[in-house]
Image (cartoon, grey):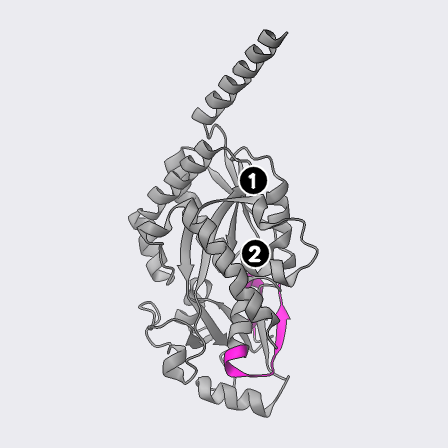
Amino acid sequence: MKRAALAVLAVLAAVSAQAQDKYPSKPVNMLVPFAAGGSSDVIARLVGDEMGRVLGQRIVMENMAGAGGATALTRAARAEPDGYTIVIGNSGTNAASYTIYNDLKYTQADFVPIGLVAKTSPMIALKLDFPAKDLKEFIDYAKKHPGKVNLGHAGVGSSNYLICRTFLKASGLDVALVSYRGAGPALNDLMGGQIDGVCDAATSLSGAIQGNKVKALVVATPQRLPSLPDVPTGAEAGLPAFQAQGWNALFAPKGTPEPIIARLNEALRKALESPTLQSRFKELSSVPPRQDELTPDHVARMVPGEIEKYRVLLTEK
């Protein structure tokens, strides 16, 4: 009996190893926690296309908006850990959400990092006819009209919500924050004049700014962005405390075999080397990770610090 049981285990192990060797043998599903059109969605599609070429299988995007990204993260945490369901996360979904929501159906331990995908540049943009031509005039206007100005974001718990909170902490303004199911719908309403401004990343705002459909106010980076050279930094505009950097990373459900994580990380690395992707990242002011930031271990070390950083931001009075 004991010999037979060991034989069965050996066969199962061999089958499992063979399945991992052939991975992926079908398309991989990448969950995007927000509606189409936002930074996470844009970055996911660019990286997913290139990773699919490396893997020899399509990576299929599935947008799952809701609860600041928690809906998609919950599904990812419950998915079969076989490498066929992965999720793109950010500072909101995989860091701030643990402070914002007390009823999450997942924890940090429910995910295994695949690798850092991109670093993004937080911005504030306004509708074209807003009565302020720069940050100083915007702050003056908002102070004279407390609670009357509104800024849209991709949902409480999203990285865009964190941009709003960082901006309000730096400026001390009293403005209304309007929650959407993603950055795309918020930007559409901004271009239509339904809201005054948005908190977003240059990745999803660049096209609208360059097309003169919205008015860029300030970027939270130390230097101006090459793709948007006319947009001042917080320090240049008189608000040096408005400093932030966003990020996106890929995660898999806990228990995903290490060889599969390694295969996905390898595909991510090769995708980020693509001249096509690098060119698009440059246009969108998204920064590829450095070589030392590309490992799953780097993300595993980074996330706890991000959780604490946003805990402090979101609980300070």
Of circles 1 and 2, which is in front? Answer: 1
Residue 304 or residue 33, whichever sits in front: 304
- Cα distance in 3D space between marks 1 and 2: 16 Å
**x then y, percent, for residue 103:** 70, 55
Q: Quadrant of residue 100?
A: bottom right
Q: Amino acid at mark 2?
A: Thr
Element at badge 1? loop
Does the magenta segment cover residue 187?
yes
- Name the residue tied to disc 2: 93
Q: Is residue 216 above or below residue 156?
A: below
Residue extending furthest toward the front: 2
Residue extending furthest toward the left: 275
Q: Is residue 84 above or below residue 199?
A: above
Q: Amino acid at mark 1?
A: Lys
Task: Write the start and end of the magenta stretch as one range.
Answer: 169-192
Nearer-N-terminus badge (1/2): 2
Q: Is residue 75 above or below residue 246?
A: above
Instruction: Indicate which disc residue 254 carries.
Output: 1
Q: Does any portion of residue 187 appear in the rendered image?
A: no
Residue occupying the point 45% across, 88% down: 136
Residue occupying the point 62% across, 64% down: 156
Numbered circles on residues, count:
2
Please report contact status of discs 1 and 2: CB closer than 8 Å, yes or no: no
Instruction: Indicate which disc residue 96 carries.
Output: none
